[in-house]
Amino acid sequence: MDLTLAWVHIGVMYFSGFCGAVGKEVLLSSANLVDLRDGPHGFELHYSCHCGQPGVVYPSVGAIGRCGEPACV
Ligand SMILES: [Zn+2]
């Protein structure tokens, strides 16, 4: 699965992450954003999944986000 990262003209960002609670990829938006950081794997996008678990996306390495468990890149 490819990371879906799209910026629309109104400035709302959409991205996808794998949700372990529902067992599939879910669409997330800037409303789910918790934090943006610069970590050892580059730019990190921390989000709060629909299921309530935290998740992280690493756009610079093309890794899809995943909630509910420590990120492993
Ligand atoms: Zn989830």
Image (cartoon, rainbow, N blue to C red):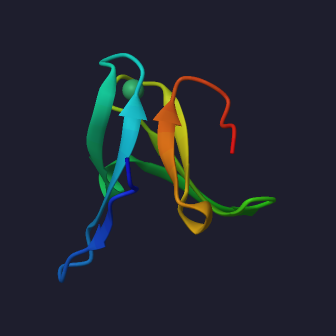
Residue drawn at point x = 40 percent, y = 56 percent = 3
- In the rendered image, the vertical position of residue 40 relative to residue 54, given as above or below: below
Tell which of 51 and 20 is nearer to you.
20
Give x and y (percent) for residue 25: 31, 36
Corner quadrant of residue 60: bottom right
Residue 25 sits above or below residue 9 on the image: above
Q: What residue lies at 67% left-to-right and 62% top-to-bottom?
A: 37
Q: Nearer the viewer, residue 51 or 27?
A: 27
Q: Quadrant of residue 52?
A: top left
Q: Is residue 40 above or below residue 12?
A: above
Q: In front: 8, or 10?
A: 8
Q: Residue furthest top?
A: 21
Quadrant where the C terminus is found in the figure: top right
Q: Return the x and y of residue 22 as percentages of the image width and height.
A: 30, 18
List x then y, in percent, for residue 27: 25, 45
Whole-percent x, y for residue 47 in the image: 48, 45
